[in-house]
Amino acid sequence: MILKLLGLGFKEYSRDSYNIFDAILVVASLVEYCLSTAGVDQLMGGGLSALRGVRLLRVFKLARSWKSFRELLGKMFLTLIDVRTFSVLLGIFIFIFMLLGMELFGHKIKFNRNNEPINSITRDNRDG
């Protein structure tokens, strides 16, 4: 990144959005590395290691020069649009059957004070 920045100059380097994206990734990686070596990452519960997954987005840089990969990404995007309609329909069905299950099976199980289910057979034998 530094060699490219020195070779192109800041103005020319910042014209390409992929250069800016790469710079952000490099800075995030350096911050993560410095904080992990200092032990701060362990204090935060390892949340900084999620920044490593962002590096995988560099693969999309290949789509600019690789025609078949660009076509594949376009087809994947169109497939996601088709799946979106099916997902909404599936969500409606799940919601309807959830309501049906609540109506059919709701209030069939009774709980005691400790939130343990009460066996209806035992309860009926005690009453009668």
Image (spheres, rainbow, N blue to C red):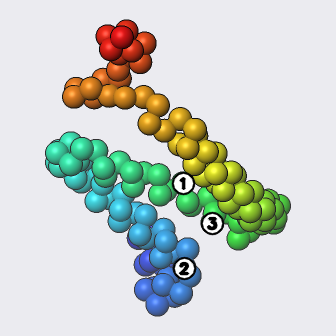
Q: Are marks 1 and 3 in contact (CB under 8 Å)?
A: no
Label 2 sits on residue? 17
Name the spot of residue 17 as percent of width and height, x first.
54, 79
Give the CA separation, mark 2 to mark 1: 17 Å
- Helix or strand or loop: what does disc 1 sit on? helix
Q: Amino acid at mark 1?
A: Leu
Q: Which residue does the numbered mark 1 point to in the structure image?
A: 56
N-term-proximal mark, 2 vs 1:
2
**38 versus 21 height, above or below:** above
Residue found at x 78% / y 62%: 82
In this rendering, does residue 66 appear at all?
no
User: What residue is at 39 percent from the left and 55 percent from the top?
Assistant: 51
Q: Is residue 69 left or right of residue 21?
A: right
> Which residue is labeled 3 in the image?
61
Q: Quadrant of residue 109?
A: top left
Question: Considering depth in this image, is 12 or 38 the residue closer to the camera?
Answer: 38
Give the answer, above or below, for where 21 lies relative to 40.
below
- Which quarter of the picture shows residue 60? bottom right
The amino acid at mark 3 is: Lys
SS for callout 2: helix
Foreground: 83 or 12?
83
Residue 50 on image: x %, y %? 39, 51
